Amino acid sequence: MKQILTSVFIVCFFAMLSLSANAQNVKIVEAKDKQQLDVYIDDQLFTSYCYWDSQKKPILYPLRTAKGTVVTRSYPVAKVAGERTDHPHHVSAWFNYGNINGVDFWNNSGGPRSEKMGTVKHVAVNKVKNGKGSADLDVTMDWIMPDGSKVMQQDETIIFRAAKGLRVIDRIITLTAQDKQVVFNDSKEGALGIRVARQLEEPSTKPEVFTDEQGNPTKVPVMDNTGVGGIYLSSEGKVGEKEAWGTRAKWMTLSGNVKGEDVVIGIFDHPKNPTYPTYWHSRGYGLFAANPFGAKEFTKGAPALNYTLEPGKKATFRFRILVYSGKLAKEQTEALYQQFLKDVTK
């Protein structure tokens, strides 16, 4: 009986999402002077697509719940009391990778090593389409090597969806190699990333040191765990960083309570993605990332994937980010995942 009621709840929920009479207005407003496009749900700001010169890739900053609660880390854009200040390249929500033909796009935060790293540069806004229930944003980005050459083009459709208590971002990303072969050398540093608010981290029990691919350490100290209680859950039933990190799954959620509001952040992988199901780079200190290009580093011995695009060839990746106000059981998340497959078919 409980499973039947859960299924009925989800069906009714997404019926509301699809009916224009009940859907919320979603509007994208461009602010060229600020180098960003703001996304409003019934006149309430949800997030912004930002291509600021201060960042080395476009970002979605910040992510908010339907109640307006910010669920992503503010640093390094702003400083908030109690937040961690490690990994300045983890900025809200983004997409890039740690080893493209030997060049690191992931760790570039504009610091001393930036001249040796790649940059993802916003090039154009191709289309904005507003409406009830959803709004579409089509953009183009160039992946630029340290020598200034363009190694890859990213054409992306970002679909923002809204219903009561739910915010959704669908990212349909097409990557096209330019005049050279593009190799996504096996790395844990990728690719669709979210850095979450302190309350959604797992409680910190000991200091840690994390090392990037250049051997540069970042110390992550033990902090005050008051109000901190994030929990990872994968579609395969893996719970917490210890079980979930480096595993493969079609979806993963991170749930907790932020400023008195129960929230769930989810990332969904699509069966049409070339390397489905993705590996998960899900860290207890607040990095939540789906990595479709890593393998060896996650499995401690599996053959390196080294996903490759030949010159002129392209590949499309489809992901959903959801921000849900409330709690979700595994069965409810699976129903939401099935809705994702109905919404994104190409």
Image (cartoon, grey):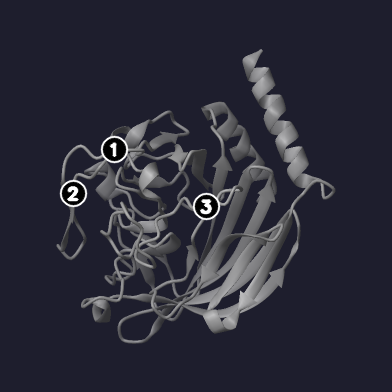
Mark 3: give few (<14), some (14-19) or many (20+) Cα within 10 Å: some
Q: How many numbered discs sit on the rendered protein?
A: 3
Q: Amino acid at mark 2?
A: Pro
Please tell me whether mark 2 sits on a helix, a strand or a loop: loop
Q: Image point 27% across, 59% down: which residue?
A: 85
User: Relative to the observer, which residue lies in front, 66 or 151?
Assistant: 66
User: Relative to the observer, which residue lies in front, 213 or 134?
Assistant: 134
User: Relative to residue 260, is residue 76 depicted above or below?
Assistant: below
Q: CA gap, disc 3 to disc 2?
A: 37 Å
Q: Amino acid at mark 1?
A: Pro
Q: CA gap, disc 1 to disc 2?
A: 12 Å
Farthest top residue in view: 1
Q: Which residue, given by chain and number where applicable, does mark 2 sit on?
A: 221
> Which of marks 2 and 1 precedes in the sequence?
1
Q: CA gap, disc 1 to disc 3?
A: 33 Å
Q: Is residue 19 left or right of residue 251?
A: right
Q: For residue 7, which numbered disc appears in the image?
A: none
Please tell me whether mark 1 sits on a helix, a strand or a loop: loop
Q: Which residue, given by chain and number where applicable, does mark 1 sit on?
A: 203
User: Relative to the observer, which residue lies in front, 25 or 136?
Assistant: 25
Q: Image point 56% across, 58% down: which residue?
A: 171
Q: Which residue, given by chain and number where applicable, does mark 3 sit on?
A: 273
Nearer the observer: mark 3 or 2; the answer is 2
Q: Is residue 163 left or right of residue 104?
A: right
Q: Give percent across and percent down for residue 237.
A: 43, 28
Mark 1: give few (<14), some (14-19) or many (20+) Cα within 10 Å: many
Q: Amino acid at mark 3?
A: Asn
> Which of marks 2 and 3 precedes in the sequence?
2
> Which of marks 3 and 1 precedes in the sequence?
1
